[in-house]
Image (tube, helix red, strand yellow):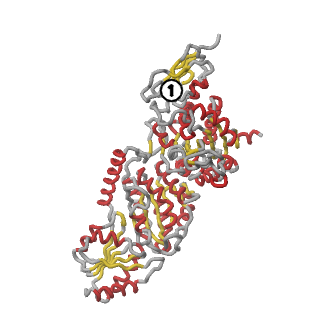
Amino acid sequence: MAAKGKITINQGLCKACELCLTVCPDEAIRLSEGLNEKGYHPAETAKDSCKGCALCAVMCPEAAIEVCRG
Amino acid sequence: MKIVYTRPKCLKPVPNHYCPGCGHSIIHRLICELVDEMNMRGRIICIPPAGCAVLAYNYFDFDVCESAHGRGCAIATGFKRAQPDRIIFTYQGDGDMAAIGTAETLHAANRGEKITSIFVNNAVYGMTGGQMAPTTMIGQKTTTSPYGRRTEVEGYPLKITELIATLPGAAYVVRTSLANPAKIRETKKAIKKAFEVQMAGAGYSLVEVLSPCPTNWKVSPREAFAYLEEKMEKEYPIGVMKDYTAKKDK
Amino acid sequence: MKGTDALGEAAIRAGCRCYFGYPITPQNEVPEYMSRRMQEVGGVFLQGESEIASINMVLGAAASGMRAMTSSSSPGISLKQEGLSFLAALELPAVIVNINRGGPGLGNIAPSQGDYYQATRGGGHGDYRMPVYAPAYVQELYDITMKSFDVADLYRTPVMILGDGMMGQIVEPIYLHERPDVEIPPKDYILDGAENRPSRIIKSLILDPVEMEEHNWKLKRKYDLMAHELPEWEEFMTNDAKLTIIAYGTAARIAKGAVKRARSEGLKVGLLRPITLWPFPEEAIRNLAKKTKLFLVFEMSTGQMIDDVRLAVEGKVPCEFYGRPGGVVPIPQEIARIIERYWLQKEL
């Protein structure tokens, strides 16, 4: 069975650059409908497909993503 | 579940001023990860540039000394000569490193100063609003090269990293890119090695990082990262240009 | 001992352990001396690739908590102005020596006082002041060099020593005393790695105008304090002087000779010699303005310090000027003739 992962996005830091979406192999991230304090549509978890590869966190310019795996 | 990736401790828990998709903030994070992992906070001093990264002290939770535009390597020399057991690094943009600070950079490298330079090349002046940089590519439009950079008028993109690789004082010279997660990991490895080279007292170490500036390239962050890989890496090939440890192995 | 060597030795004995500089005539004996002595005392001597690099190396060493200095001559000092502005803004201590030569431009390498404005008006950008000392004797050069490092540390400021080729080359017997005891507060601003303490920042960028204004006023309070505490001057036969010469540095040495000549002929002439050019000893000049009938300002320039004299005198006494720019060094007889001319002309 593939590893199970979970990401936690600090939406307050997110600037909606979409780089995490671009690199996610599991389509686990999308932009939310709502706005954050800065006026961006921050990234959020899209579905339960995350395997904890952490590519999104490696890419994230805001260091806004924490990744768990297990 | 265990945490496999989290914000480094040395990166202050505050939002940064960089534009969406800016490479500076990625490089800041990598440096902070290394400061944490290599336990360097108590002996590292950063000299950021004049430019977008002038505000790096708002994010780095370790000692930081401002510099006048281009003077980073001279100030770093003063620090290192005064405190040889500390880890001193400059963080410089293309204008800082390769235009106004060319002399300071080249001579520090040539003296073999035991310092590290992180050179962020995004081929444009970011802070001042997108003017031409020494590293602006041929044909690239900027606010001061509105017809695209013409070699007969503005000359050629300056490859200061290649230049520095020819100097005996330079111990480790490498160019990396932020174009994708694998390359970002390579960048971190290169910066780590640059610090190790400094700690070994081998000489000057330089990591040039090709970095996107979506705002002044006037493209989306996604397009900027694609441009980085497709265009910038063609003009500025990534890879190790000099490595004193490789020589020793032979 | 030669002026330049006295300067170097005083710096070493003041605890200066970092020297950075770039060769330029007529001050090359300073870096040459330092290159020998720093090795002996385990300090740092480094010939920078330019004056700009050198002053920034000084900045890095000062931010490391070391006593650091650089030296140069006029065109080189022009290049250092960026660094001086930053040192002032960042409140970092450093000593900068200017062995003034003829100018503008390349000029020549002869003694000149053409850099007075640049030195006292803050030749770099921004709203700052910097103490400027103008010694006239080798012993004084030695003493002032030693003191400059304390002043720099006490007020956290760059300090300039302004001399000329004459001051540097002249040989006089001096007493090489050790540094007097001056208590320097702990340097809690330096960057040496954030081991077991919060991280520190040394910066001058203050984007918020209100905060910047606060910083400017904070600096101003420090400058006011210096203006109150630092002025130094020498008075020579001023008590009954009807004509008082005001001159500094080499010009003051010449003027002193002229005063002696004039006195031997019965003319009541005196000399006030500013030792600090900033802060300017205006109080002393104001006091003399109550007694003397005429001020004669003598400079080896076309007239720069005379502005400060006039500001101090506030029109209460006439101020005349005699200058020899370009590196011409007049002999005392020449100044004595000028004194006589004014003595007769003004019916003193």
Q: Is residue A58 above or below residue B93?
A: above
Location of mark 1 (residue)? A64
Where is residue B98? Give x, y as percent. 60, 50
Is residue B84 in sight in this rendering? Answer: no
Q: Judge left or right: residue C110 versus residue C298.
A: right
Q: Residue furthest left?
A: C290
Please name the amino acid that badge 1 sits on. Ala
Q: Judge left or right: residue C347 versus residue B59.
A: left
Q: Is residue C94 above or below residue B130?
A: below
Is residue B152 in sight in this rendering? Answer: yes
Q: Residue furthest top?
A: A1
Q: Residue furthest front?
A: B147
Q: Judge left or right: residue A16 versus residue C290.
A: right
- The residue located at (27%, 79%) in the rendering is C294
- The residue located at (57%, 32%) in the rendering is B221
Q: Judge left or right: residue B109 versus residue C78.
A: right
Q: Is residue B215 above or below residue B72?
A: above
Where is residue B48? Give x, y as percent. 52, 44
Where is residue A70? Give x, y as percent. 58, 14
Query: Helix, strand or loop at disc 1?
Result: loop
- The residue located at (70%, 43%) in the rendering is B241
* Camera-side residue of C35 and B225: B225
In the picture, the quarter occupied by the C terminus of chain B is top right
Where is residue C334? Give x, y as percent. 40, 85
Identify the chain of the residue marked 1, using the numbered disc in the image.
Answer: A
Q: Residue furthest right?
A: B250
In the picture, the quarter occupied by the N terminus of chain B is top right
